[in-house]
Image (cartoon, rainbow, N blue to C red):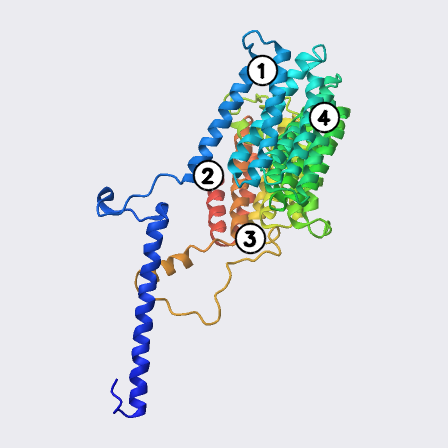
Amino acid sequence: MDTNLPPVEELRRIDAELTRLDARRAELLGRRAWLLGVLYAPAARPAAPFGGFGGVATPPETSPRGAQNVLLTLGGTLLAIAALAFTLVSWGSMGIAGRSAVLLAVTSAALAAPAVLLRRGLASTAEALGALGLVLTVLDAYALHRVALPGTDGVGYAAGASAVLAGVWAGYGGLLPRLRVPLPAAVAAAQLPLPLGAAAAGGGPAAVAWAVLVTVAGDLLLLGRPAGLTARITAGASAGLLGSWALLTGGWLSLTEPWTGAPLLLGCAALGLYAVRAVRPAAPALAAVAGLAAVGAVAGPARAALPGEWAVPVYTVCGLALAALWRPVRAAWIPAPVRAGLGLAGGSVAALGVLWALPPVLGGLLGPADRSAGVWSGAHAAPPLGGYPATAALVLLLGAAAAGAVGRPWSRWGAPALGWAFLMALPVVLELSYAAGLAVRLVAAAGALAVAVRPGVPTRGLPESAPEAPAEVPARPEGAWGASWTAGVAAAPPAPGVLAAWTGFAAGAAAAASAALLALDARGATFAVLGVLFGLFAAAAALGAGAVRGAAAGAAVLVAAG
C-alpha cells in the first residue's frame, strides 16, 4: 500500500479493494455450492447436451426412493395374491384348518413387523407390510368362517366380520399412527356392517336404505372431526356414494310406495343440509340435492292421493314453494349458498313442469295451419293433442304468477310470455268451441300487443337504457384500439323495454296469425276476425313508438289487404 497518500484517499482505496474482494468471495461461494450439488445430488444434475457428452451424466428416470416404493408395492401385491391363492386353493395335503393356522401365524408376523421397521426408519417397508397384514386379516376372517362357522349365513357373517375388522384396523392405526393405510381401510370397512346387517335380517330396500343413511351420518360426523386427511377423504367419498344410492332408492320408493319413500327422502334432505357445514365449497350443490329430495318427499304422498292428471301440478307447486326460499326477504336466516341451492332445485322442478305444459301451446298456435277441409267450408277440425290433461293450463298460470312475483329481469319477460302461453293452450286442453277458440286467440293477440305498446308496465323498476357514461368521457383514441372502442359502445345490449316490446309484438303477431288461419273455416268468421285484427294493429301503430310502430302499421296494411 502507498502510505504516502493522504488519509482520505487511502481510506477510499481500501474500501474499494474490500468491496472487490467481497464480490469475488460471493462468486466463488456460489460456484462452490453448485459443484457440491453436482457431486452429491445426482438426481438434480443438469442434462448435458447430445445425450450426456461433456462429462455430465443425465439424471435417472426416477429417484431411488420412488423405485423403492414401487418395488415394495409390487412385492406386497404379489404376496397378497399368493396368500389369497393359498387360502382358497388346497396346498398339497394341507386342509383348510391347517392353512388357517399357517395364515394366522403369517398375519401376526406381518402386523407386528411394522412396529420394528418404523423404529429403524424403514417407513416404506413398514407401510407395505402393514397393508399386507390388513389383507391377511380379511383372509383370516374367511378362513374362520370356513373352519369354525360353516353354517352361518354369509351376508350376516360378512356384516359382523366387517364390523370387527373396522374396529381392529382402527385400533391398529391408533397404535401405529405413522402408517397411512389402516385408518382409511377402517373407514371403508365401516361402511358395510349396517347395510349388510339390514339385508341379512330380511329387510327390504327401505330398511337397507335407512341403514345406509345411518352409515352416511357417521361419515359426516367423521368429516367434522380432526381425523387424518386420508381418513376424511375416504369418509367423504363413501358418504357421496352411499348417499347417492339412498337418494335414488328413496326416489324410486316415492314413485312406487310414496308413504315409504317420503321419510327416506326427508332423511336424505336433512343429511344433505348437514353436509353443508362439513363441505362448505359444495354448499349450493348439496343444498340443491337436499331441495330435490324434499320436493319428492312432500309431493309423493300428495300425488298418490290425487288423480293422475294432478301429478305435475303438485310437483310444480312444491318446487315453487321451495324456490320462494331463495328470496332473501323471506328467508334471511338461511345462508346465501343454501338459499341459492334450494332456489335452483325448486326452479328446476317448476321449469320441468312448464316444459310438460308446452305441447298444448304449440297445438293451439300451429293447429289451425293443418287444414283438413277447404276454405269457408264450415267444417271445423278437432284440436290437436286432444285429451291432454287440462291441468297443463294451470301449470302455465302458476308459472306466470310465480314469475311475476319474483321481480327479476328475466321474470319480467317470462310472466307475460307464460300468460300468453296459458291463453294459447286453453282451446286445446279445454277443447273449446270454435267461437270460443277464436275469442281466446284474439285476447292473446290483444294482450301481447298491449305489452308491445306499453313495455314499461312489465319492466317497471328496471333500467330503460344502458349505463350512461361518466360526465367527462375521454376522447375516442385513434387507430385499431379506437375502432374496437367504438364497436364496443355500438354493441351495448338493448334496453329491457326494447326486448319486452319486440317479444310482445312477436307473440301478438303469432296469435293473430293463428286466429286468422282458424277463421278461414267460415266466411263470416274470416271477415270478423280480420276486422278485429285490423283494429288491434292500427291501435298498436297509433299508440306505439319506434320500430314497433312501423311493424304494427305494416301488419295493419296486410290485414286490411286480406
Horizontal arrangement in the rendering, residue 378 relative to residue 147 (left or right): left
Which of the two discs, 4 and 3, labels the residue nearer the N terminus?
Answer: 4
Q: Which quarter of the rendering shows the N terminus?
A: bottom left
Q: Amino acid at mark 1?
A: Thr
Which residue does the numbered mark 2 point to in the structure image? 561
- Residue extending furthest toward the top: 93
Question: How many C-alpha atoms fall within 10 Å of the one at disc 3: few (<14), some, or many (≥20)?
Answer: some
Q: Nearer the viewer, mark 2 or mark 1?
A: 1
Question: How many C-alpha atoms fall within 10 Å of the one at disc 1: few (<14), some, or many (≥20)?
Answer: many
Q: Is residue 386 above or below residue 542?
A: above
Which of the two discs, 2 and 1, labels the residue nearer the N terminus?
Answer: 1
Using the numbered discs, state the Cα–Cα distance from disc 2 to disc 1 in whole angstroms: 94 Å
Local secondary structure at mark 4 = helix
Horizontal arrangement in the rendering, residue 32 relative to residue 445 (left or right): left
Which residue does the numbered mark 3 point to in the structure image? 543
Q: Is residue 415 above or below residue 383?
A: below
Using the numbered discs, state the Cα–Cα distance from disc 2 to disc 3 in whole angstroms: 22 Å
Q: Amino acid at mark 4?
A: Leu
Q: Is residue 354 visible?
A: no
Question: Which of the numbered marks, if any, corresponds to residue 87?
Answer: 1
Which residue does the numbered mark 4 point to in the structure image? 194
Using the numbered discs, state the Cα–Cα distance from disc 1 to disc 3 in whole angstroms: 91 Å
Which of the two discs, 2 and 3, labels the residue nearer the N terminus?
Answer: 3
Which of the two discs, 1 and 3, labels the residue nearer the N terminus?
Answer: 1
- Pinpoint residue 324: horizontal percent, then vertical percent: 70, 44
Local secondary structure at mark 2 = helix
Q: Amino acid at mark 2?
A: Ala
- Pinpoint residue 195: horizontal percent, then vertical percent: 70, 24
Question: Which of the numbered marks, if any, corresponds to residue 555?
Answer: none
